[in-house]
């Protein structure tokens, strides 16, 4: 009888246990080499688009932030006229995200961990479409599967 109980407990433990790892990414990683080619006072808006592709968001001179697919303007443009007011692109925002998720279960106890890190890049332009400032935080690859952080 004791042996049967031990076998049933071992089977329940083995059958009720599991683990998983998952990695999610949004957009492509930002290239440090491409970012290094962007020079304030020299690089133009079309050059930024050539180096990095289309941004996640465009921030206009009136403070409106619009996703690239919002239908404002067409292609790589610097100005847009709305309601008689000419707006210009104030900044491009690029974002790459990595989320790592891990989980472990033993019968009724589960431990799940999510860690999300971002690469964020803001490129600011003047009225002529020339880069004025570049700000980057490149932390996406530091995402961890560990439930206790990295």
Image (cartoon, grey):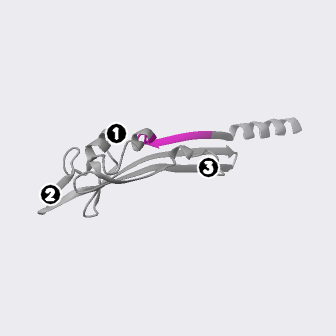
Q: Which residue, given by chain and number where applicable, does mark 2 sit on?
A: 81
Whichever of callouts 2 and 3 sits on the residue coming sooner in the sequence is 2
Q: Residues within 10 Å of mark 3 (few under 14, many from 20)?
A: some
The foreground one among 37 and 68 is 37
Residue 34 picture location, percent across and down: 40, 40
Whichever of callouts 2 and 1 sits on the residue coming sooner in the sequence is 1
The foreground one among 123 and 67 is 123
Q: Which residue, given by chain and number where applicable, does mark 3 sit on?
A: 112
The residue under the point 61% across, 44% down is 145
The residue under the point 64% across, 40% down is 19
- Tell me the quarter of the image containing the N terminus: top right
Whichever of callouts 3 and 1 sits on the residue coming sooner in the sequence is 1
Camera-nearest label, 3 or 1 = 1
For the record, the magenta segment spans: 20-32
Numbered badge on residue 51: 1
Residue 37 picture location, percent across and down: 38, 41
Whole-angstrom CA distance, mark 2 to mark 3, is 49 Å
Answer whether residue 110 is visible to the viewer in this image.
yes
Tell which residue pokes out farthest to the right in this image.
2
Q: Residues within 10 Å of mark 2 (few under 14, many from 20)?
A: few
Camera-nearest label, 2 or 1 = 1
Figure quadrant of residue 91: bottom left
């Amino acid at each position: 009888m004791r042996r049967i109980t031990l076998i049933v407990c071992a089977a329940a433990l083995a059958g009720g246990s599991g683990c998983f790892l998952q990695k999610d990414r949004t957009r492509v990683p930002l290239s440090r080499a491409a970012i290094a080619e962007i020079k304030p006072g020299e690089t133009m808006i079309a050059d930024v688009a050539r180096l990095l592709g289309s941004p996640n968001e465009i921030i206009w001179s009136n403070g409106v932030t619009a996703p690239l697919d919002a239908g404002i303007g067409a292609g790589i443009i610097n100005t847009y006229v709305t309601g008689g007011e000419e707006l210009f692109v104030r900044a491009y925002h690029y974002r790459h995200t990595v989320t790592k998720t891990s989980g472990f279960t033993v019968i009724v106890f589960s431990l799940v961990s999510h860690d999300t890190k971002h690469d964020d890049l803001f490129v600011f332009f003047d009225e002529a479409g020339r880069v004025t400032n570049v700000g980057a935080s490149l932390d996406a690859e530091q995402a961890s599967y560990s439930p206790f952080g990295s």
